[in-house]
Image (cartoon, rainbow, N blue to C red):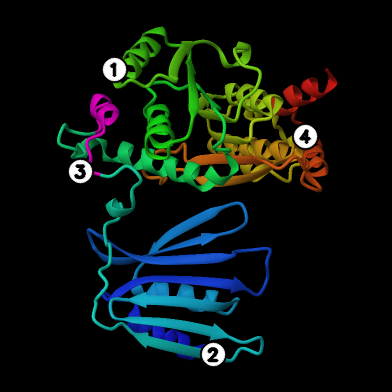
Amino acid sequence: METIKELLNSILNIEFIQAIISNPREKDGVLKIKVRPIEKKDGLYFQCESFTKTQAFHENLKAKEAVKCLSEYMEKFRQMQVFTKTMDYTVLVSKKGKVTIQKKALKGCVREAELSHNRNKKYILKEGTSIPFLQDLGVMTKDGKIIHSRFDKFRQINRFLEFIEDILPKLPKDKELTILDFGCGKSYLTFAMYYYLRILKKYDIRIIGLDLKKDVIEHCNELSRKYGYEKLEFLVGDIADYEGVSEVDMVVTLHACDTATDFALAKAVAWGAKVILSVPCCQHELNGQMNKRHGHDVLAPILDYGLLKERFAALMTDGLRAKYLERSGYETQVLEFIDMEHTPKNILLRAVKTGQEKQGSSKEIEACKEFLGIHPMLGVLLDKGTEK
């Protein structure tokens, strides 16, 4: 692997554009790694984004650290494609560990790297394009420039649209699609969904935003009428009680507090929603249920400390939600919604209906419940729905 190290040492510099590591020797861990350069205040970094079947992780590394990290990855992978400003490289590793490096010089052109940490060029909603709802929501100026203090929100909106873009093939384009957004709040993302799906992608969609705050709903409806968004409406209502539709194609629930997320997920499953996108919030329920008696003191290092117990309970809540969705016939991913430095609410559950229960999910749920002595609300709601 020394030849790979030598190559990485020679290319991880300002000339570097991108690398893609693929074809893992084992299929039960990291399946692909993407690497790109980013310019930060203290210099050039290389962002390594690794993908498993259900998750994506990224870390920013200096050149020396990146060489070490990628060299170790290549011990478990068979292929790496590398692109620099003037060269293409293909690195192949045989079953016996023999390394072959093929290189090709670009003729007549020089690539340019996008070093911005925010990757403006790749945003679905482009800076410089006048988008009325972003202006009224205080994110963009009239000439299409992003207001500096609202750039995190602009980035979050685009990241959310990327999650939708990935699942577009799962949504039929030959009929009207019904999308419900529970706990829509000020509706940055609701307006973004409508603009992206209806205006940019030409899907026939109807979106209903639901929230308990009457003044916020009134304002959102005013904006919807102002833009001529005929199939975007906002209603005052509670997630648990909403019965306004009988069939839904996609359910979105962002930052619905505590068990309100569970009610939204249970509704989505009952409707047979093809896609579910959920960013949970304030997961208090299991924190009050867990104790050492049921954990046989094994979890004392976590359960004895309030802060750690709270975080563990939140992660366990979302993990079990993902498992319950798998049990209900959904292929479920736990994804990073936005960097931890911007908000602690950075987990997004994305579930796509397959109609097939994931093998082993029921047993895993029951074993976890028994060990911790817990009864998650989503399980209670789904079991009640099954009994009907």
Residue at screen point 74% across, 30% down: 374
Mark 4 or 2, closer to the camera:
2
Residue kind at label 1, given as amino acid type: Lys
Q: Residue 99 got which mark?
A: 2
Q: Residue 293 got which mark?
A: 4
Task: Say if 108 sits above or below 313 in the image.
Answer: below
Quarter holding residue 187: top left
**Distance Cα–Cα, label 2 vs label 3:** 46 Å
List x then y, in percent, for residue 91. Answer: 49, 83
- Give the residues in magenta: 127-139
At label 1, counting other C-alpha atoms closer than 10 Å, the crowd grade (few under 14, some 14-19, many 20 or more) is: few
**Distance Cα–Cα, label 1 vs label 3:** 21 Å
At label 3, counting other C-alpha atoms closer than 10 Å, the crowd grade (few under 14, some 14-19, many 20 or more) is: few
Is 137 magenta? The answer is yes
Nearer-N-terminus badge (2/1): 2
At label 4, counting other C-alpha atoms closer than 10 Å, the crowd grade (few under 14, some 14-19, many 20 or more) is: few
